[in-house]
Image: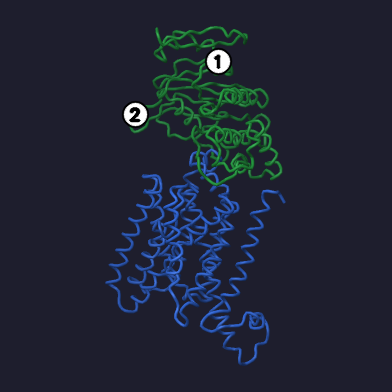
């Protein structure tokens, strides 16, 4: 039971963009994917999403090889939040969120409406439901897609079949309250629905505060994989980001860390 | 009914009523005027001996022609809407992208090099359309955006047009008469035996396309997003392209190139009902049928007893609309 990538190598135009990367996303955990720009975070997410041809290695979803699983089945078990979804089309917010139910055509319209309403509240877009999607701000559009993915994750639950969620920089265009709300949502999905949530993040403090486990990528390889306190250490961070880092216990949240980079050093 | 469904369903019902009215008016008017009120009597009653001519005109000429315009309009509008979603490009349209020209090239090849006849034209036109659609899609993907697709369309139209021109020089007089018909399009070839094949064929594929509304909505988000919503991209793309060619090819074999219906109609529907294909496709179907019925009606009544080429009428309306779309700037549907 997990979404697993084994010894993944991915090439683009003859260049290796991921080299012998292995990772595992289990049910009930929030996994943060960190690393400098160009480290291969989005590429790894795309590989787990089944979007990219693999030069080596393989991806399995609950022990079934991804390439042998039809898209329709994958969509019933794994939802992907893209970094920059399509931006301009004349659909209402309700219609965009409702697309999360497309992998479940057997759902009755009333159940879809209920799922959409619930997801809209969770993603804080309930006040936007009747608005045209194209007129929203970038951050609002991103939360609309988050709501769409929540519908896909909540529709027609099957006992013993966890859902996997892959979110590519969901906090990128969000203000601080919404950044925390998004990550709190991920934790709630993991705890209440036993979902496995993989989140690409840049903010190490958000990662330290909300993620159960972290994978740090640098230069196309995995540098560290483990709980925040094992990954966020000054030597690892300095080596990865090329900058001196200080890791301190969080003054208010017991057991959590905070990270500071030191440009002077 | 859900509140959000009320507006589009009533719009679709309204379009259906308008279509029936327009079809009745189009049946009644033309070189020989038939009073609208006598239509039911001519169709179902016992016409007076003097009315036999009217009845023949109505049943053998007008009705098949009006049905044919409605059918062609519905198919072209739906194909245009589907193509705009698949190509993710608001300017995709069978005429502009060169799919009609590909179909015409196939048909012209069949006219010049074989004994002709619709049963050879239709498959030849299908193959021509299929080749052009696949080529436009491949070229449009290499250079994304409006410009890439339009350039692909120009290239395909040029190649197909020059080959059609070349074959024209090889043609004899009888073939030439058939060929000129492609340039401007015509619904004058409508008759019951043509309809008997083309109507079920076109309707089946058009309705199949209209049922793909979830897939087309998902494609609005992007190809990756469509895949993550459970649509296997490679397969569905191939199916859509083949289905569009199955609709447009035989239609072009029977009508020649009728431009701009596939561009104008879906745009007007989107402006009023939005881009949700669940409503856009059936509404485009009805509005396309309505538009081409009216265009053909105009073409027949403006210079009685002669008639304008139908392609001329649709281009007169569609050309300026196209210019307006370009001037308005890039906007993804």
Disc 1 secondary structure class:
helix
Q: Is residue B122 above or below residue A140?
A: below
Q: Quadrant of residue A126?
A: top right
Q: Name above or below for residue B218 compared with residue B303.
A: above
Q: Residue at x 69, y 41 (%)?
A: A113
Residue under numbered circle 2: A15
- Which of label 2 and label 1 is nearer to you? 1
Give the chain of mark 2: A
Residue A175 visible in the current orientation: yes
Q: Residue at x 50, y 19 (%)?
A: A215
Q: What colour has chain B?
A: blue
Residue B135 drawn at (x, y percent): 37, 52
Please state the horizontal and vertical placement of residue B43, each as a whole percent of the image. Answer: 64, 81
In the image: residue B177, left or right of residue A143: left
Label 1: how many Cα within 10 Å (few below 14, some 14–19, many 20+): many
- Whether residue A114 sits left or right of residue B22 in the image: it is right
Colour given to chain A in the rendered image: green
A166 over B157 or under it: above or below = above
Which mark is drawn over residue A251? none
- Which badge, 2 or 1, is on the more N-terminal residue? 2
Q: Which residue is mark 1?
A: A208
Mark 2 Cα shell of 10 Å, populated few (<14), some (14-19), many (≥20):
few
Q: Nearer the viewer, residue B197 or B72?
A: B72
């Amino acid at each position: 039971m997990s979404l697993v990538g084994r010894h993944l190598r991915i090439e683009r135009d003859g260049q290796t963009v991921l080299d012998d990367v292995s990772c595992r996303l289990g049910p009930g955990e929030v996994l943060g994917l960190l690393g400098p720009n160009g480290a291969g975070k989005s590429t790894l997410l795309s590989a787990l999403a089944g979007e990219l041809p693999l030069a080596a290695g393989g991806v399995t979803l609950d022990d079934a090889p991804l390439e042998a699983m039809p898209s329709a089945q994958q969509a019933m078990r794994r939802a992907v939040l893209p970094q920059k979804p399509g931006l301009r089309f004349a659909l209402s917010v309700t219609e965009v969120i409702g697309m999360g139910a497309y992998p479940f055509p057997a759902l009755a319209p009333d159940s879809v409406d209920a799922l959409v309403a619930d997801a809209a509240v969770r993603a804080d877009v309930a006040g936007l439901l009747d608005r045209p999607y194209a007129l929203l701000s970038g951050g609002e559009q991103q939360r609309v897609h988050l709501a769409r993915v929540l519908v896909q994750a909540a529709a027609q639950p099957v006992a013993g079949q966890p859902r996997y969620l892959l979110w590519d920089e969901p906090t990128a265009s969000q203000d601080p309250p919404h950044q925390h709300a998004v990550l709190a949502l991920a934790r709630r999905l993991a705890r209440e629905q036993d979902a496995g949530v993989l989140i690409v993040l840049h903010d190490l403090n958000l990662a330290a505060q909300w993620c159960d486990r972290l994978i740090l990528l640098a230069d196309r390889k995995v540098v560290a994989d483990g709980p925040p306190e094992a990954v966020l250490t000054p030597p690892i961070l300095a080596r990865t980001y090329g900058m001196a880092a200080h890791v301190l216990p969080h003054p208010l949240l017991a057991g959590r860390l905070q990270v500071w980079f030191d440009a002077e050093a | 009914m859900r509140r959000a469904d009320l507006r589009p369903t009533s719009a679709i019902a309204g379009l259906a009523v308008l279509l029936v009215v327009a079809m009745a008016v189009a049946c009644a008017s033309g070189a020989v005027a038939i009073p609208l009120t006598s239509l039911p009597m001519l169709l179902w009653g016992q016409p007076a001996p003097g009315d036999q001519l009217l009845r023949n005109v109505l049943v053998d000429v007008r009705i098949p022609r009006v049905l044919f315009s409605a059918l062609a309009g519905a198919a072209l509008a739906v194909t245009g809407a589907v193509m705009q979603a698949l190509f993710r490009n608001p300017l995709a349209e069978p005429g502009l992208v060169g799919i009609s020209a590909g179909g015409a090239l196939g048909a012209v090849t069949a006219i010049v090099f074989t004994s002709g006849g619709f049963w050879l034209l239709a498959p030849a036109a299908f193959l021509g359309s299929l080749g052009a659609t696949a080529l436009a899609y491949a070229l449009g993907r290499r250079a994304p955006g409006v410009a890439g697709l339009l350039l692909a369309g120009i290239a395909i139209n040029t190649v197909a047009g020059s080959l059609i021109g070349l074959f024209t020089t090889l043609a004899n007089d009888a073939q030439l008469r058939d060929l000129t018909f492609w340039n401007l399009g015509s619904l004058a070839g409508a008759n019951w035996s043509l309809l008997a094949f083309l109507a079920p064929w076109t309707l089946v594929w058009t309705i199949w396309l209209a049922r793909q509304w979830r897939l087309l909505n998902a494609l609005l988000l992007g190809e990756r997003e469509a895949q993550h919503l459970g649509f296997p991209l490679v397969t569905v793309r191939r199916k859509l392209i083949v289905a569009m060619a199955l609709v447009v090819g035989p239609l072009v074999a029977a009508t020649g190139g009728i431009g701009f219906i596939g561009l104008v109609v879906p745009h007007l529907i989107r402006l009023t009902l939005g881009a949700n294909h669940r409503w856009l496709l059936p509404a485009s179907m009805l509005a396309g049928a309505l538009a081409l019925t009216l265009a053909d009606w105009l073409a027949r009544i403006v210079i009685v007893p002669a008639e304008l080429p139908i392609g001329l009428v649709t281009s007169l309306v569609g050309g300026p609309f196209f210019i307006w779309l370009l001037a308005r700037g890039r906007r993804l549907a």
